[in-house]
Amino acid sequence: MKQILLILALLLAPLAAAAQEETVVAGLSQNEVSITANFNGSEILIFGAVERYTPVPEGNPLEVIITIEGPDRPVTVRRMDRRYGIWMNTEAVEVDAAPTFYAVATTNPFREVISDTEDLRHRISIPRAIRAVGTETEHQRDFTDAVIRIRTNEDLYQVLEGAVTLRNETLFNTSFRMPANLVEGDYTARIFLTRGREVVSSYETAITVRKVGLERMIYTLAHERPLVYGLLSLAIAIAAGWLASAVFRYIRMGG
Amino acid sequence: MQIYLPIAEVSVNAFLLLGLGGLVGILSGMFGVGGGFLLTPLLFFIGIPPAVAVATEANQIVASSFSGVLAHFKRKTVDLRMGVVLLIGGLVGAALGVQVFNALRAIGQVDLLVRLCYVVFLGIIGALMFVESLRAIRRSKATAGAPPPRRHHRGWIHALPFKMRFRTSGLYLSVIPPLLVGLFVGILAAIMGVGGGFIMVPAMIYILGMPTKVVVGTSLFQIIFVTAFSTLLHATTNYTVDMILAVLLLIGGVVGAQVGARIGVKLKAEQLRILLAIMVLGVCGKLALDLLLQPSELFTLGAASGH
């Protein structure tokens, strides 16, 4: 399957505009992630090829960076301190926009494939992807670091150095594992080609993450007709409880 | 089998939820308590957001108390008039409780409040039950069959105005104490995600002086309406009631309660009470330790208040 997709990507390659010496053409195994009742995360395969009409340039080797970014949301980060002998939230800092999901995969260790200035310009590494307006003091950094640490533990932020396979400086592929606790919205997949730690070409495409079926219905009803939803959940819960005890009584009498 | 909860937005094992519901159901069947005070903290431990756990638990309590109250109506052990007075206090309390809950959620102190409430109330109730059942066991060994000393009712409750006759309970007393009891339980129900039976039952016996046989039915009657009301409040203001979570917990709970009720028949009342007391103190101790020991992660993330 992977091979077929790669061949397909190669066949489509000449269609892309050749503005630069080397451009990237890519495809995704899926452009849509559906959150269903038994959703347990999703795997996305990203593959592509480097299109060029000249021989492979000499010198610095080609590197590939691939990112997937979820919708940005503001986050309140709270810190606990000991007060009156118990641990409680004392300080809060608002981070203006942090992606709800962010994964970055590279061909080699991050520092070897891109420079700081290029990282800053394209917002590729995780700390760059988080926007915290205001003074970048040491204090503020503690809080942004906490966002990265907590989300990394939940697999929402992933750094996958060396996870992109590049063959003959032409074909590349990687796969991302997206966890079950995804936020709905429009996700972006970006691919960067770099040489000598400078970006030479980039490509961007969208992935849609949506709840579907029963999940969609319940979520929409709960937010758009909350009173109806509340009454319905009471009715369903009462009916279910009554039914369960009736079934149990029936089994006991039968047995 | 993993199942994605649409409101909590987490994926959990369906059998884990059924099992938790069942386990708490067995305990509630054995001891005749609602079990909300155990299930809500357990939901925190498996990663359900506290706001969703509290709101959904209220929904689940309505359903699990429903068949109980029907049985009590059949046996005529519900004091409707007292129930309605307690209910009026309870509805006001629940409305206040949800307001407090939302205000504290905005400033990030809701977890602390919920945990503190649990530690304080479980600690008090657990310790009282433990001491009393120990004393009961010792007494039954020492003087078999001697009746416990009868409590004398304090004068101040009878001095209050707005008296009313409660025929089923055989009481003539002011409506102020039951209103206050209802109010207090309503606030706790909304904040802690419990029915509040473990507070209301002792209050009805010791403060209001109601006969034991009508206490359980009447408290269930009040609990159903108060928790239904707080479910609706949570659903319309926070959108935190998870229908799928509630149904799964409930199915486990109903089956567990039937099993538990049969285990309970085989044990002696004092033994049951001392077991329950130990369990209540255990949950209390675990929550207290979480507050006192330094957590491994000092930072927490929350949705921004503007959202």
Image (cartoon, rainbow, N blue to C red):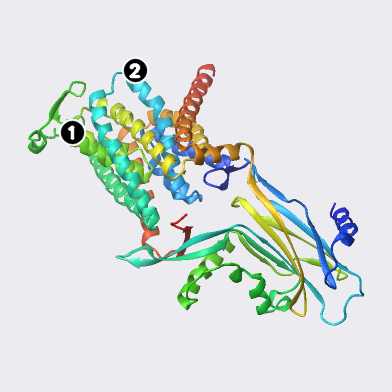
| Alpha carbons under labels 1 and 2: distance apart | 24 Å
B134, B240: nearer the viewer? B240
Q: Amino acid at mark 2?
A: Lys
Q: Is residue A58 left or right of residue A196?
A: right
- Looking at the image, residue B82 lies above or below residue B51: above
Q: Quadrant of residue A83?
A: bottom left
Count the numbered circles shown.
2
List x then y, in percent, for residue B307.
Answer: 47, 54
List x then y, in percent, for residue A239.
Answer: 48, 26
Mark 1 lies on residue: B208
Mark 2 lies on residue: B74
Q: Is residue A54 left or right of residue A157?
A: right
Q: Secondary structure at mark 1?
A: loop
List x then y, in percent, for residue B214.
Answer: 26, 25
Q: Amino acid at mark 1?
A: Leu
B219, A226: nearer the viewer? A226
Q: Quadrant of residue A191?
A: bottom right
Q: Secondary structure at mark 2?
A: helix
List x then y, in percent, for residue A70.
Answer: 62, 58
Q: Residue furthest bottom?
A: A59
Q: Residues within 10 Å of mark 1 (few under 14, many from 20)?
A: some
- Looking at the image, residue A17 lies above or below residue B188: below
